[in-house]
Image (cartoon, helix red, strand yellow):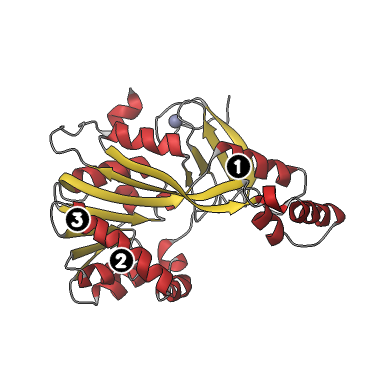
Amino acid sequence: MTDSKTCRICASQRTSPTIRFNDWQVHRCSDCGFRFAEDGQPIVYEDHYDEDYFAPLMQRDQMDKWSRIYADRLAFLRQNAPSDRLLEAGAGASTFALNAVDQGFQVTVADAAPWAVDFLSSHDGVTGQLVDLNQCDFPAGQFGAIHCSHVLEHLREPRQFLEQCLSTLQPGGVMYLSFPAYEGRVLGFRDGLYRLGLANHPYNYQAPDHLSYFDAPCIRATLEQAGFEVVRLRRIKFISVRDTAERMDDSGLLRKMVRLAATATSPISRRVGFHRDLEIIARRPREKSIPQVEPSARRAA
Ligand SMILES: [Zn+2]
């Protein structure tokens, strides 16, 4: 098939196009289930991830809810990491890094956005690294913990990035990872609605901002093949059919009917739905040696 692409996770050629949106084509790998967007116009990091992009996220970080979420994550990392050296990979301008300094971590922030790196590294206790995470080269065995929230979906080369994360963790080091879930049944349903004209968009692919789409089995297998031990993997941020229907605009008879039906069946439609995000704790094993496979060699195999 002429338009099949090489899977960026398992290097399989058994991939096929699924849906086209925003001038990007989404492909799915039949072997590992990874989905990825190809052939659109990529964003320029410096232009796209500027102060305006980060402003609402920084505002969100000021909410009590997010302070508590960050405090819980930091407490977990503090208890489980073998050292106080923390890498905030794809930090953006999140105040997580600053909260981590308050909790006693020595923090390195790595991001491709100059504005965010400048902003965070202007604070005491934070070292900044301006780096494209698709082709990063972190020093081996440097960090006791990695925090990486809503970054993986932005990367064109997530597997290489995860291999770098493993290598830069100390033995026993822990990584917190979260990102949007792209589960096949949800994508099939939502993309189907889009094809039928019942939804304005297919599922939340968001190319060119998001380029890599993992479901739970695919990220678990990818992490384990890279050499991580997956300590915990859970689905979070449940959204019900009723919530989804309530967010639909009211244009068109069919949409009105869908909303009415979801409201009328509320006891059920409140419970049926899907989780928007995946949250993972992975660890670099203490004893096991890390597989030393060059990406180029793996692809050629
Ligand atoms: Zn694959």
Question: Residue 85, percent across and down?
Answer: 16, 59
Task: Identify the mark nearer the N-term, 2 or 1.
Answer: 2
- Secondary structure beneath disc 1? helix
Q: Which image quarter: residue 32?
A: top left
User: From this viewpoint, which residue is outermost toward the front?
Assistant: 267
State the separation of the CA atoms marked 3 and 1: 36 Å
Residue pictured at 20% horizontal, 64% vertical: 107
User: From this viewpoint, which residue is outermost toward the right?
Assistant: 253
User: Which residue lies under the disc numbered 1?
Assistant: 186
Q: CB of residue at label 2: within 8 Å of ligand 1? A: no
Callout 2 touching callout 3 (CB < 8 Å): no
Crowd around label 3: few <14 · some 14–19 · many ≥20 (10 Å): few
Question: Residue 263, percent across and down?
Answer: 75, 56
The amino acid pointed to by label 2 is: Ala
User: Quadrant for ligand 1?
Assistant: top left
Return the residue nearer the eye: 89 or 293.
Answer: 89
Using the rendered image of the protein, determine whether residue 64 is visible from the camera's viewpoint: yes
Q: Is residue 181 left or right of residue 142?
A: right
The amino acid pointed to by label 3 is: Gln
Question: Residue 282, percent across and down?
Answer: 29, 43
User: Which residue lies under the disc numbered 2?
Assistant: 71
Crowd around label 2: few <14 · some 14–19 · many ≥20 (10 Å): some
User: Which residue lies under the disc numbered 3?
Assistant: 79
